[in-house]
């Protein structure tokens, strides 16, 4: 066993810090807005809970009554009455409790439903630059895990905290009313109990955080090894990796788990000892009091029972406050997402875009991202007549993609105006605008569902015949019918089961079915086999015909056939014209053409 | 259950610790059983008979018992956690190492996420069971036996009446356990759906927006979301029934005790102290009885976890060095396929058929053909990532199945199209195959792979962390690090995919130069995309549907006029067109053309 301290990488320890947060009134207020619609239900729950707690606390008192008033006095009738009342109270308790739990849990689930819906709706509105900053994993963590910690809290913790307080108050009152002196003596162990609990929680939380860091470290090391197992084997790294795992990562996991176990093992006995002390005190002092006839035997018995019940809510409370901390952290992240401003919004008086002809005009358009003042586009002036194909050419990062993103209004220009058919895009609704546009991405994204559903995504109401016609037009029909279930073959998420070329053809069919007036095409660079390549070339021609098209072009044939080639460099248009014109210019296009497009 | 029993192999090394823990548990149970009896004598002897001294003694006895059981609890808890953590540690090590050696064929079908969750979640559930749950279960059994024995011996008739409601309580909780398990399964599925819907929406956000399909997607999300709501409501409805009811049954027990016991006290057949003791015993029994479900659940989870863990551990690594493996420390690099066929498990068609091929040391073999034609399958056989279904594959005249895997693979370098790097420093990544390599060697490899310059550009140079959590490298940079990684191995046989998709022209040139350097003086198999590579190959293999359709040099194949020529011509169209246009241009403006144009021809 090595004695050197193992230190996990900082990204692991840092990522764990975000799970803790003290009480924050802003977060509480933000979360409270979700509770508002259900205030009435919560109030009813609260009343029910008071009833349940009162009934529960009365238990030992009934035992006392039964002993003192019934048994000790040899009074069968009194005993019968007491027992029957106890039974009645317990029935009230059980039914009220069932109703309360159902009521409250439904409210809780409604709230969580609302939170998830609010998150989703907001995500639908956020601009694409948000998605550049936020990874898929993070978004899903927000909606699943963070809402999950809220669930823990709303479903159990809120009520448990109230219940525990009620129970403590109830027990304290019951004990005080039974015997003042004995109560105060019993309560004298409480401060020690509370201090011990607080100290324990503090250490336990720190340990817990380290265990969590150890888990996530182990997880990431494992994940990397499993995902990269082919490389591991190719380079015969197994022995080395195993040693690293065993002596560092997994060892750290083991040591942190043992730290946590040590602290956890101490706490319970402390509580038990305090309980034993309190019971011993009550037994001795209470016992002598009974002998001195200042209290009855029943009171003594009730006291012993109450001591048992007093510690539970205290322990439970401290546990719930932990939940509160992670809830605060989770809540803060949820609110942060919900409060992320929506950059592109419909103007209040936005009109429906009338059916387009497809004439596009960029007038002195510039753009930069809100968090970075560097201009991505700088003074773009470009007029495209209806039905023309424009090839956008330039190096990676020159601004080609940004141009088409402005056109689809994924972003708004920082200055200048962008018009379609002479109408400023900012004056129309996004939905009516995009319904008339189509987009084919470089890495075509397919949704999980059948091939048919994926093509239908272009126009939901389309008939089967339309779908097949679209697939035929782009040359996808042949391979689709050869798939296991033809058009009903399910495409796994992202389209992993299909080849890149096939996915492209399906996305072409989708775009064709939408029959957009303006088409945006980000041509794929990835290599496909020659046969598919030919089909794709043909499909492209079909797709581009008769609509205004913006193509981020990589294929020479696409560029040459365009009506207009626009060469972009550093966010500016440096050249525009036809292939022949630009070659004669011997400018940047000529250079690019010479070096870049061959082979 | 039989899987759960198999866990004992992992417990065996800790036999003495387990024995000690169990002994502590036994004593502990005895002590907790004694407390109600002391209270009883306090009431019956101390109070009723009025002995103050007895009260003092009892108070000290209670205190002493409290301290002793606290010590034992501490020991018991810590050691059971210790055993659990140890078992978990051992299991994770075993899993980790085992997975590393499972062949490609296994990993092709296994989902990586699943494997990871087996190592973490499933091992955890086994751990939890081996630690806390088993202890609690044993404690419950011991307590039950003790309590029932004591109560029956004290007063059999009252014991039966008072314990009657505990029976349905146990039945209800165990019934609840099976029910809730199913309901939770539904919750998990529904949550999975929500997360899938979300993931698709985030990944496909551009498509959703571009086609203005937000309302449709919202509707789909709402359905999934409602499902989560509904499944949770079912779960909580079950909870709402069980928790208050089990509490109530305990209360009924106490009520029965008071009524019947009370009458017995009046008859003089029972003491008040006994009633109080009985009451304490009932409460003592009811609490763990309510947790029984949780324990049964933990057992079920651990059994399921154990099954999944053993599923992995029971899979024999199909590809291993044989006993008496032949170790060839310095390969010449001759590779021979003798009538090789390959059929992947679960697939109907052969991926390779009738492959016979002899490659001499230092030859360059270029493989071309459409996706799925068998190029990758063919090269994957050389480092024995898969075993041939029939035929033989010889390296330096020895069947690879007779060779020592590590010495074989150490002499084969591989650069794939998507270059996977690990979350480690650049240095660590380059030295991946040879962790002992010196810094000079690493830098030399990086220089040869055209990677040195951009690595030096990072603030931390070779110590920059790359991979998922570090600096994000571009595709071209990743590829060059991967080339350096292969170079450092100084392999005798090299396998590479020379595709350089999605990098800019400048980078592509750098990569090609690096690759050309890498191929020098080694037997090389290239899945080729570039004409220049194909052209100078010693052997070109044209593959289709798992067979070698044509083979020969560039000139031979062109002369034959078959499939190769067809592909060649198609790919050349663009290139030829370009050359033509340049020619035209030159004719158009002969006087003004500068050196640039000339240098192209």
Image (cartoon, coloured by chain):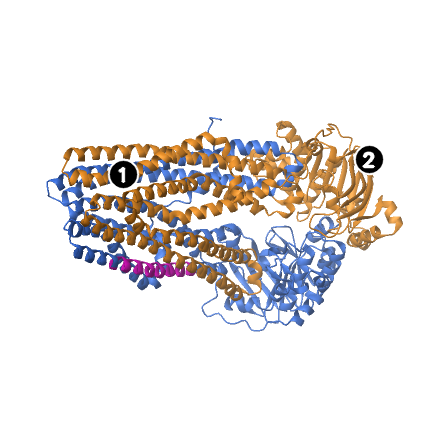
Chain colours: A blue, B orange
x then y, percent, for residue B158: 28, 49
x then y, percent, for residue B125: 48, 43
The boundaries of the magenta stretch are: A88-114
Q: Which one is earlier in the sequence, the residue at label 2 or at label 1?
A: 1
Quarter of the figure with residue A556? bottom right
User: Is A112 contained in the magenta span?
Assistant: yes
x then y, percent, for residue B385: 69, 40
Query: Label 1 marks which chain's residue?
Result: B
Magenta stretch, main secondary structure class: helix
* Label 1 residue SS: helix
Circle number at residue A348: none
Farthest right residue?
B559
Read off the residue under disc 2. B360
Read off the residue under disc 1. B35
x then y, percent, for residue A531: 76, 57
Q: Residue at x 62, y 32 (%)?
A: B431
């Amino acid at each position: 066993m090595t004695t050197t301290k193992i230190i996990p990488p900082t990204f692991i320890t840092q990522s764990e810090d975000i799970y803790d947060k003290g009480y924050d009134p802003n977060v509480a207020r933000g979360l409270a807005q979700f509770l508002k619609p259900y205030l009435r239900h919560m109030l009813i729950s609260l009343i029910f809970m008071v009833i349940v707690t009162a009934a529960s606390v009365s238990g030992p008192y009934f035992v006392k009554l039964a002993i003192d008033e019934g048994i000790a006095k040899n009074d069968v009738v009194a005993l019968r009455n007491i027992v029957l009342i106890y039974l009645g109270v317990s029935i009230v308790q059980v039914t009220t409790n069932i109703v309360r739990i159902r009521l409250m849990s439904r409210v809780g689930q409604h709230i969580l439903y609302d939170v998830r819906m609010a998150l989703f709706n907001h995500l639908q509105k956020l601009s694409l630059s948000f998605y550049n900053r936020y990874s898929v994993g993070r978004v899903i963590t927000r909606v699943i895990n963070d809402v999950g910690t809220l669930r823990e809290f709303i479903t159990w913790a809120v009520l448990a905290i109230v219940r525990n307080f009620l129970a403590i108050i109830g027990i304290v009152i019951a004990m005080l009313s039974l015997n003042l002196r004995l109560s105060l003596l019993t309560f004298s162990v409480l401060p020690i109990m509370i201090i011990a609990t607080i100290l324990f929680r503090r250490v336990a939380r720190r340990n817990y955080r380290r265990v969590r860091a150890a888990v996530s470290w182990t997880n990431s090391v494992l994940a990397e090894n499993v995902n990269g197992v082919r490389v591991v084997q190719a380079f015969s790294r197994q022995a080395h990796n195993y040693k690293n795992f065993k002596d560092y990562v997994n060892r750290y996991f083991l040591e942190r788990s043992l730290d946590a176990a040590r602290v956890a093992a101490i706490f319970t006995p402390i509580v038990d000892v305090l309980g034993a002390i309190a019971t011993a005190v009550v037994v001795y002092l209470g016992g002598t009091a009974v002998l001195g006839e200042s209290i009855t035997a029943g009171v003594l018995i009730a006291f012993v029972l109450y001591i048992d019940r007093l510690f539970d809510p205290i322990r439970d409370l401290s546990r719930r406050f932990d939940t509160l901390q992670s809830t605060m952290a989770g809540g803060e992240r949820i609110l942060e997402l919900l409060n992320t401003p929506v950059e592109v919004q419909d103007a209040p008086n936005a009109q429906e875009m009338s059916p387009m002809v497809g004439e596009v005009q960029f007038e002195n358009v510039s753009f930069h991202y809100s968090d970075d003042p560097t201009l991505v586009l700088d003074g773009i002036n470009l007029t495209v007549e209806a039905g023309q194909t424009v090839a956008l050419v330039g190096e990676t990062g020159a601004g080609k993609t940004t141009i088409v993103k402005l056109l689809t209004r994924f972003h708004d220009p920082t200055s200048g105006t962008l018009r379609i058919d002479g109408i400023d895009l900012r004056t129309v609704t996004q939905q009516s605008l995009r319904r008339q546009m189509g987009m084919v991405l470089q890495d075509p994204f397919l949704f999980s569902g059948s091939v048919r559903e994926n093509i239908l995504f272009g126009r939901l109401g389309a008939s089967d015949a339309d779908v097949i016609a679209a697939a035929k037009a782009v040359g996808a029909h042949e391979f689709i019918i050869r798939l296991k279930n033809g058009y009903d073959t399910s495409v796994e998420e992202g389209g992993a089961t299909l080849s890149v070329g096939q996915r492209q053809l399906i996305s072409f069919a989708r775009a064709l079915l939408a029959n957009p007036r303006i088409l945006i095409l980000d041509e794929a660079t990835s290599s496909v086999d020659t046969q598919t390549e030919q089909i794709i070339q043909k499909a492209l021609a079909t797709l581009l015909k008769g609509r205004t098209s913006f193509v981020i072009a990589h294929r020479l044939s696409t560029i040459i056939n365009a009506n207009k080639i626009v060469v972009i460099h550093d966010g500016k248009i440096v050249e525009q014209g036809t292939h022949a014109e630009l070659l004669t210019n011997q400018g940047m296009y000529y250079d690019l053409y010479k070096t870049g497009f061959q082979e | 259950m039989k899987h759960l029993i198999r866990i004992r192999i992992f417990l065996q090394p800790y036999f003495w610790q387990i024995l000690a823990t169990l002994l502590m548990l036994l004593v502990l149970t005895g002590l907790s059983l004694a407390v109600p009896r002391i209270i009883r004598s306090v009431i019956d002897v101390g109070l009723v008979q009025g002995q103050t001294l007895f009260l003092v003694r009892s108070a000290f006895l209670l205190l002493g018992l409290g301290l002793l059981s606290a010590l034992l609890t501490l020991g018991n808890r810590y050691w059971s956690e210790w055993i659990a953590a140890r078992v978990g540690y051992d299991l994770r090590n075993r899993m980790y190492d085992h997975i590393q050696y499972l062949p490609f064929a296994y990993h092709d079908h296994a989902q990586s996420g699943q494997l990871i969750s087996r190592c973490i979640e499933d091992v955890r559930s086994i751990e939890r069971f081996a630690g806390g749950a088993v202890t609690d279960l044993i404690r419950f059994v011991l307590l039950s036996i003790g309590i029932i024995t004591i109560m029956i011996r004290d007063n059999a008739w009252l014991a039966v009446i008072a314990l009657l409601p505990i029976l349905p309580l146990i039945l209800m909780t165990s019934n609840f356990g099976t029910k809730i398990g199913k309901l939770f399964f539904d919750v998990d599925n529904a949550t999975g759906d929500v997360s899938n819907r979300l993931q698709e929406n985030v990944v496909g956000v551009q498509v959703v927006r571009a086609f203005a399909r937000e309302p449709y997607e919202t509707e789909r999300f709402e359905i999934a979301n409602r499902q989560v709501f509904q499944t949770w409501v079912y779960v909580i409805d079950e909870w709402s029934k069980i928790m208050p009811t089990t509490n109530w049954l305990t209360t009924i027990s106490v009520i029965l005790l008071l009524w019947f016991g009370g009458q017995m006290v009046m008859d003089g057949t029972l003491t008040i102290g006994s009633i109080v003791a009985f009451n304490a015993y009932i409460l003592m029994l009811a609490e763990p009885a309510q947790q029984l479900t949780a324990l049964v659940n933990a057992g079920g989870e651990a059994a399921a976890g154990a099954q999944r863990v053993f599923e992995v551990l029971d899979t024999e690594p199909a590809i291993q060095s044989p006993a008496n493996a032949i170790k060839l420390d310095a390969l010449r690099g001759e590779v021979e396929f003798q009538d090789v066929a390959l059929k992947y498990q679960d697939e109907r068609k052969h991926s390779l058929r009738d492959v016979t091929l002899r490659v001499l040391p230092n030859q360059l073999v270029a493989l071309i053909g459409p996706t799925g034609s068998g190029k990758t399958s063919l090269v994957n056989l050389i480092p024995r990532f898969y075993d041939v279904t029939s035929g033989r594959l010889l390296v330096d005249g020895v069947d690879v199945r007779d060779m020592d895997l590590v010495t074989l693979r150490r002499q084969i370098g591989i650069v794939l199209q998507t270059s996977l790097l690990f979350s480690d420093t650049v240095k660590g990544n380059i030295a991946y195959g040879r962790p002992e390599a010196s810094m000079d060697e690493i830098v030399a490899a990086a220089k040869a792979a055209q990677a040195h310059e951009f690595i030096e550009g990072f603030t931390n140079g070779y110590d920059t962390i790359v991979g998922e959590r570090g600096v994000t490298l571009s595709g071209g940079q990743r590829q060059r690090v991967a080339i350096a990684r292969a170079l450092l191995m100084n392999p005798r046989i090299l396998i590479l995919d020379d595709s350089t998709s999605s990098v800019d022209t400048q980078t592509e040139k750098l990569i090609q130069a690096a690759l050309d350097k890498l191929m020098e003086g080694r037997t090389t198999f290239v899945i080729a995309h570039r004409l220049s590579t194909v052209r100078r190959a010693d052997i070109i293999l044209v593959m289709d549907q798992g067979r070698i359709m044509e083979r020969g040099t560039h000139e031979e194949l062109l002369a034959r006029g078959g499939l190769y020529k067809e592909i060649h011509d198609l790919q050349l169209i663009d290139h030829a067109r370009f050359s033509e246009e340049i020619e035209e241009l030159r004719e158009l403006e002969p006087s003004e053309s500068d050196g640039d144009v000339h240098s192209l021809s």
